[in-house]
Amino acid sequence: MPFAIELVLDPAAGAAVRRIWRELEAAGITAMARAGAHPHISLGIWEALDLPAAQAELAAFAGEIEPIPVTLAGVRTFSTGAVFLAPEAAPGLAALHAGLHRRFAHLGTGLWEDYAPGRWVPHCTLAMDLTEDLMPVALEIARRAPLPLGGRLERIGVVEFRPVTQLCAFALGIRPA
């Protein structure tokens, strides 16, 4: 199963995203509501990851980064059948992404191309693996969300998926002891 490094939204913003997930679930679109995931923005996905080394590096990396203000401002889609909330350009988010990939390049193999620096599109997934008939339903529900949605990215962690299993998480701005 693949591994992702994710930035997790603060509880209030996360609750707003979860409300959208529940509305989607009521319409039969269940992937995110039942995945076990936290509302997040993924920074990278690898097929394999040296977990002990990645956990140690991520703890240090998290201590060097302050929580990041984020505004989820629009509803967008990927051609892969996904609907997501797109953040406004957040100062430093692209640099943080590139820095993470420099530090983790030797710790993982099989990086998913869409998460490589220069190709990455920051997103908070609302629905995925949508069939052609469910895409308009998901878009209608997502567009009812009260946007813009402000929040902070407060934690960074590693998950293994599907199903989602949190392997480690660290608060941003707190240096390991």
Image: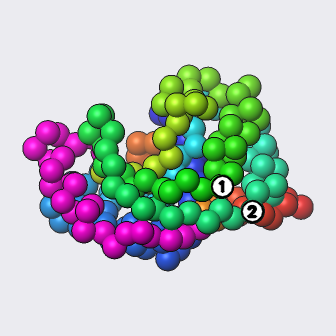
Q: Is residue 17 magenta?
A: no
Query: Please, which residue is most extreme toward the top here?
Result: 110
Return the mark for residue 101. none
- Residue hosting label 2: 66
Q: Which residues are magenta?
A: 128-152
* Secondary structure found at label 1: loop
The amino acid marked with disc number 2 is: Glu
| For marks 1 and 2 on the same chain, the one whose residue lies earlier in the sequence | 2
- Horizontal side of 102 relative to 46 (left or right) equals right
Q: Residue at x 61, y 32 (%)?
A: 117
- Residue hosting label 1: 91
Q: Disc 1 and disc 2: Cα gap in Å?
A: 12 Å
The amino acid marked with disc number 1 is: Pro
User: Foreground: 164 or 146?
Assistant: 146
Q: Is residue 113 above or below residue 97?
A: above
Q: Quadrant of the C terminus?
A: bottom right
The 10 Å Cα crowd at callout 1, few under 14, some 14 to 19, many 20 or more, is few
Relative image position of residue 80 (x, y in whole percent): 30, 34
